[in-house]
Image (cartoon, rainbow, N blue to C red):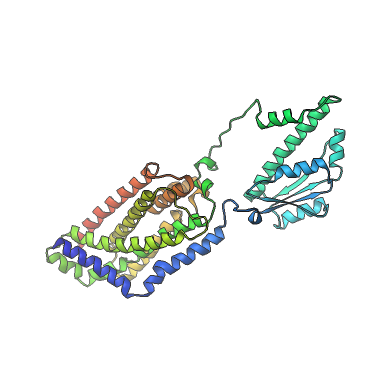
Amino acid sequence: MTSAVIRTLVLLHVRKILAEKSNLFWMFGMPIMFTVLMGMMFGTTSSSGPSEAPEVTVYDASRSAASGDLIASLGGREQYRIVVADTVGSEDLARQLVDDGRRTAALWIPAAFDDSLTAGRPAPLRFFFDSDRASAQTSRTALAEAVRRLDAIQGGRHAAGAGEFDQAVFDSLWAEPRVVLAATTLGRQQQEESALAGMSSGFQHTGPSYTLMFVMMFMLMSVRDIVLERRAGTLTRLRLGAASSTTLAAGLFLGPLLVGLAQAAVLLGFNTLLPSMDYGDSVATLIVVMVLFTGVSSALALVAATFCRTTGQADGMGMTVSMLMASLGGLWWPLEIVPGFMKQLALMLPSGRAITVFHNMIGRGWGLTENAPHLLWLVGALLILMVLARVRLRRLIA
C-alpha cells in the first residue's frame, strides 16, 4: 500500500507537468535564455585574450630608448592591453579619453623624458586612470613598478659615474631582491578567500546560478498543485485509505524531486556548451549538491503548501520565496562582490550554500571534503523540512 501510494503521487505529478506544454519552456527555455544573456552581461572576470582586454593608450612624445623600455615593461598583462598612439598627443587628450570612458587608462610621456633622465633631473609622467575599473588599477600598479625599476637603474648609472654599470647584476638583484616583504591582505577584499579568483567567465556564475534558481522556482510554483489536491480531498481520501502522513509526505516530495533533477540534468548539460564552463574535477560533488538542493527545494515547497489555503496564496508564496532566496542567496550576482553581512545572510539560505559549493568547485577545484560544511548544512535543512512537512500534513488531514 505504501509503495503504491507513493508511486501514484509521483506519477500524478509527472503527468501534470508533461500535460502542460508551456511547462517545458519555463523548465528549459527560460533558464537557457537567462543563462546566456546574463552571462554575456557579466562578461569575463579576466580577459581571455588581448583583443578583448580594456585599452591603455600611451602617448609617447619622447620616442626614446628609455620610454620604449618603460612601455615594454607594461605589456604582457591579461587585464589590459597597451596601445601606443601614432601621434604624440597631449596631456589634455590623455585625460579626456579617460574622462569620457573611452579608455581604462592613458599615459602621456613628455618629449624631454629621456633628456631629463640622462641629466639626472626629475622626469615627470602623466597617468590618468579610472579608479572604478579593475583593469585600470592593475595598469597603475604595473606602471608604478616599472617607474621604480627605471628610477633605480638611472640612480645606479649616476652612482657608477665613470665606472661601468652592470645591467646583468642589477636585473638579478631586481628579480631576486635580498629584502623581501611578505604582506597579507585582510578584510572583504582578501583575494585568497574569493572563489572568483579562479573563475574566468561570467557564464561560470550564471550557468549554475540560473540552473539553481529555475529548479527552485519551478518547484516552489508546484505549491499550487498540492493545494489543489488538498482542497479536492485527494489527500484526505488517501489518508482514510490507510496511507500515513509519512507516506503522503514522501509521495508529494519525490514527484517534484524527480522532475527537478531531470530539469537540472538538462540545464547543467547545456551549460557545458558555454564558453569556459567547467564544473571542476569532482563529479560526485556536483551530483550531491544538486540532489541535496533539489531535495531541499521540494521539501520547502511541500511545507509552504501546508500553510496555503487557496491557489492565489500558493502562487504568491511560491513566487515571493523563490525570488527572495534567489536574490539574497547570491543567484542574481556573485556573493564574492557583496558586503560581508549579506554573504552571512546568504549562507543561512539553501541557495547561498549551493552556489557557494559551485563557486568552490569551479574557482578552487574543491571536492566533497572541502565542501562538506555546506553539504552537511543542506542535509540538515532537508531533514528538518521533511519532519516539519510530515507534522503539518498529519494535522491538516487528520
Image position of 189 (left or right of 18): right
In the rendered image, which quarter is residue 230 located in?
Answer: bottom left
**As displayed, is residue 252 above or below residue 368?**
below
Foreground residue among 212 and 220: 212
- From the image, which quarter does the C terminus lie in? bottom left
User: For residue 395, which quarter of the picture?
Assistant: bottom left
Residue at (24, 68) in percent of width and height: 11
Q: Say if residue 346 shows up in the picture.
A: no
Q: Where residue 396 sits in the image (x, y, percent)?
A: 20, 62
Picture layout, residue 253 above or below residue 109: below
Q: Residue at x 15, y 60 (%)?
A: 244
Q: Is residue 374 above or below residue 100?
A: above
User: Which quadrant holds the N terminus?
Assistant: bottom left
Q: Is residue 153 visible?
A: yes
- Across and down, in percent, residue 282 comes to 40, 48
Tell me the residue at 64%/51% (across/down).
Answer: 133
Tell me if 68 is positioned left or right of 196 in this view: right
User: Residue 365, how many percent across, how many down?
Assistant: 45, 45
83 sits left or right of 226 in the view: right
| Residue sticking out furthest to the front | 168
* Residue 205 in the image, given as x and y percentages of width and height: 49, 55
Q: Relative to residue 25, is residue 128 depicted above or below?
A: above
